[in-house]
Image: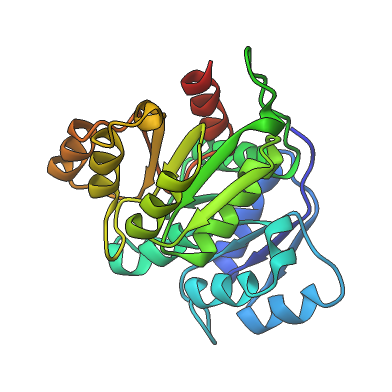
Amino acid sequence: MPSLDVILVEPSRTQQHIISMHLRACGIEAITCLDSGADVIALLEQSKPDLIISSMYLPDMTGVDLLHELRKDNDSYDMAFLLISSETNIKYLEPIRQAGAIAILPKPFTLQELKTALAASSDYLNPQKADLEHLDVEDLRVLLVDDSEFSRKYITRVLNNIGIEYICCAEDGKQALQLFDQQYFDLVITDFNMPEMDGIQLVEAIRGNGQQNASVPVLMVTSEQNQNRLAAIEKAGVSAILDKPFEPKSIKRLIVQLLN
């Protein structure tokens, strides 16, 4: 794994020391420790790291606020973002998942969990194109459906990284179905929770379409944890389900499996 240039934003000196120690154990030496979100934003005007690791609660903002502030700049998608937090409330974690965090680690975390997150960051920053048997990945036509602009931009970046260039975006299932009826797609990637028409309704509409492309593979990327809802997603005819946040290599592997 290539070495990463890391900004660690954590107000606790003790936690700074512990996390830095674990990072060094993973071979990461370039670590800049900061105390607040404002410090991060100021430093980014001078240089950009490979990875920002943040606590959820900072003196001047939350980790959610920081990530949203960063994502206003399209160039921020050149960096990976990792949250380390003891927070378990889905209300606070969901915006982080939607905005394109590479991973969310608990406090305390294991060294293996950190290594996995760092490997995912490396895959995101140093991508390799997907290798398909019967298709040129550059010719793939993908319909991406998500009501979060941050999520659409993040997933688009991941797809671009593996060589997919034609990506048509929709904000909800209703808009996606209109696009689906107008043109051909090799793959549909959709969120679950959306206004107007959710992911299940979209999949059911696609599968009941009756057209030749009604059997198109559908990959659902969702942070949904409710087992009954996940079972309903599978029953609707989705081809695969991927958790948010996901490792870039996971979506690459699934796309290769679905399209080969």
- Number of numbered discs on residues: 0
Query: Compared with residue 108, is residue 44 higher up or lower down, i.e. above or below?
Result: below
Q: Is residue 161 left or right of residue 239?
A: right
Q: Is residue 202 visible?
A: yes
Percent from the top left, x then y, of residue 124?
67, 43
Above or below, 237 relative to 59: above
| Of 176 and 76, the residue lying toward us | 176
Q: Residue furthest bottom?
A: 60
Identity of the residue drawn at 52% across and 55% down: 169
**Residue ID at (26%, 58%):** 197
Q: Nearer the viewer, residue 180 or 124?
A: 180
Q: Quadrant of residue 159?
A: top right
Question: Is residue 203 positioned above or below 13 on the image?
Answer: above
Query: Where, by quadrant of the figure, is residue 138 drawn?
Result: top right
Q: Residue at x 46, y 63 (%)?
A: 96
Front one among 211 and 58: 211
Q: Position of residue 104 (x, y in %)?
A: 46, 53
Residue 89 visible in rendering: no
Question: Which colour scheme appears in the figure?
Answer: rainbow
> Furthest residue to the top?
133
Q: Position of residue 6 (x, y in %)?
A: 73, 56
Left or right: where 214 falls relative to 230:
right
Quarter of the N terminus within the rendering: top right
Q: Name, please, the residue furthest toward the left.
A: 228
Measuring 48% from the left and 34% from the top, which residue is drawn there? 187
Q: Which residue is at the front of the view, 180 or 127?
A: 180
